[in-house]
Image (tube, helix red, strand yellow):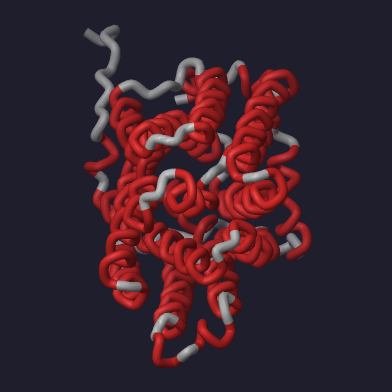
């Protein structure tokens, strides 16, 4: 009887009370962030009709995000992580109130100043996200035991992607039918609900701090730790360069308008399609996690993501485009879950915030700076050629990573549990 294998419980982590509260918080705050991202994108495009202006959204958010990221990691390892998240979530809500104010036509703010006020709020949002991210990642590792890390990564990703499906679709529909004021008001109340849920998670201890460490040493230690670990560095690099070149989200308003002709309502579904694929993949992974050959699965998933984006670039059919974006989300979510599990397993608790902040720089570079790269490339190369170029570059990144990071390529997470 003792030799029989332990049955895998796909729902084990959902039985942990604080994890349930945590993922519901993550669901609602992600729902609000995704809604606001789509609303801003369409609003900026309506005001400018310029793909480069859409790309600038990413750059304006990335610069403050990256500028404070290392210090944000230090804060997440030095202070109560729950309080850090709540404080900067409230700062984000303040920015949402600003966007709502700017969108009142009678005030004439956008008519007078253009998109500059919106970019200012985006910068504030970048700072808020920079501080929330490492604290969220570090807190997640505290609310579940180590043997549930892979299971928690799967369900955390599932809830995140469900919110990311609902957010753009809901944001596009509300914006399309009721306008920007109603859309931003909905964002405010959704994020506020997430804040209330997180406030009910119990208090966890702050990691022990070595008082002899200087601030400079603490800020740099996360970078040194990552760059000395081939597996962590390889996984983060795959995310940064793969999505940097392979991302299309920033250009979806242009595809919706000029290629597929579906308006803001259709844009919401285009933004949601990758998340639909991601949720379907999450449900599969919950029952059959790809842990035994994790390194190979990670490389294959990024390759599949890049190929899906390549075919999306040449599609002229709305439904085919939706299917290809859903496929890209399925491949992307494999890498998301594996990278989250790797980050948890290879990082000691007292460094989780700082290592997560380094990871956030990689993610910030891939998503926000990737948006700028997409806008710049579309401006000078044309919309479709720029996306094709990005997909090819993402495939090259996978090939290079597979060659220079053999420890990542041969990674077997199952033996570490």
Residue 414 falls in image quadrant: top left
Q: Nearer the viewer, residue 28 or 417?
A: 28
Q: Count of labels shown? A: 0
Residue at the image position 45 percent from the left and 53 percent from the top: 257
> Residue sitting at 74 percent across and 36 percent down?
228
Tell me the quarter of the image containing the N terminus. top left
Q: Which percent across, then down, holds residue 240? A: 64, 41
Instruction: Work out whether residue 191 can be spotted.
Output: yes
Residue 191: quadrant of the picture: bottom left
Q: Residue at image x 26%, y 29%?
A: 10
Q: Is residue 338 visible?
A: no
Say which of 344 and 61 sits in front.
61
Q: Residue furthest bottom?
A: 107
As drawn, 112 above or below 121: below
Q: In this orientation, which residue lies closer to the viewer: 116 or 287?
A: 116
In the image, residue 96 lies at what x, y percent?
A: 43, 75
Q: Where is residue 198 shown, x and y percent of the image?
A: 33, 63
Which image quarter is the C terminus in? top left
- Whole-percent x and y of residue 106? 40, 92
Quadrant position of residue 227: top right
Left of 215 or right of it: where is 80? Answer: left
Is residue 35 positioned above or below 290 on the image?
below
Residue drawn at x 61%, y 32% is 391
């Amino acid at each position: 009887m003792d030799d029989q294998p332990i049955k895998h419980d796909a729902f084990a982590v959902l039985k942990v009370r604080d994890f349930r509260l945590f993922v519901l918080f993550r669901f609602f705050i992600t729902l609000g962030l995704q809604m606001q991202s789509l609303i801003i994108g369409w609003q900026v495009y309506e005001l400018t009709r310029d793909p480069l202006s859409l790309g600038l959204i990413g750059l304006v958010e990335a610069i403050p995000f990256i500028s404070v990221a290392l210090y944000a990691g230090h804060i997440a390892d030095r202070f109560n992580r729950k309080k850090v998240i709540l404080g900067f979530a409230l700062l984000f809500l303040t920015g949402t109130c600003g966007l709502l104010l700017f969108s009142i036509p009678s005030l004439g703010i956008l008519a007078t100043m253009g998109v500059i006020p919106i970019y200012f709020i985006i910068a504030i949002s970048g700072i808020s996200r920079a501080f929330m991210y490492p604290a969220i990642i570090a807190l997640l590792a505290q609310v579940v035991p180590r043997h549930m890390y892979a299971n928690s990564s799967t369900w955390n990703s599932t809830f995140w992607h469900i919110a990311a499906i609902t957010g753009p679709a809901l944001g596009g529909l509300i914006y399309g039918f009721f306008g920007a004021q109603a859309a931003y008001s909905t964002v405010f109340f959704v994020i506020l609900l997430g804040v209330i849920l997180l406030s009910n998670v119990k208090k966890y201890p702050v990691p022990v701090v070595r008082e002899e460490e200087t601030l400079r040493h603490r800020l740099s230690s996360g970078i040194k730790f990552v760059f000395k670990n081939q597996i962590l560095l390889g996984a983060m690099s795959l995310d940064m360069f793969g999505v940097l070149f392979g991302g299309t989200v920033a250009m979806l308003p242009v595809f919706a308008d000029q290629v597929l002709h579906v308006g803001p309502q259709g844009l919401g579904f285009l933004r949601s399609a990758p998340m639909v694929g991601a949720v379907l993949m999450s449900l599969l992974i919950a029952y059959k996690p790809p842990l035994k050959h994790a390194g190979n699965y990670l490389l294959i998933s990024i390759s599949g993501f890049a190929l899906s984006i390549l075919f999306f670039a040449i599609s002229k059919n709305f439904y085919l485009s939706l299917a290809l974006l859903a496929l890209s989300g399925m491949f992307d979510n494999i890498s998301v879950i594996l990278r989250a599990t790797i980050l948890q397993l290879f990082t000691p608790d007292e460094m989780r915030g700082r290592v997560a902040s380094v990871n956030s720089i990689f993610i910030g570079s891939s998503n926000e700076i990737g948006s700028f790269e997409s806008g710049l490339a579309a401006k000078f190369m044309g919309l479709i050629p720029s996306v094709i170029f990005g997909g090819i570059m993402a495939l090259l990144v996978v090939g290079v990573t597979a060659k220079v990071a053999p420890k990542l390529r041969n990674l077997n997470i199952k033996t570490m549990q």
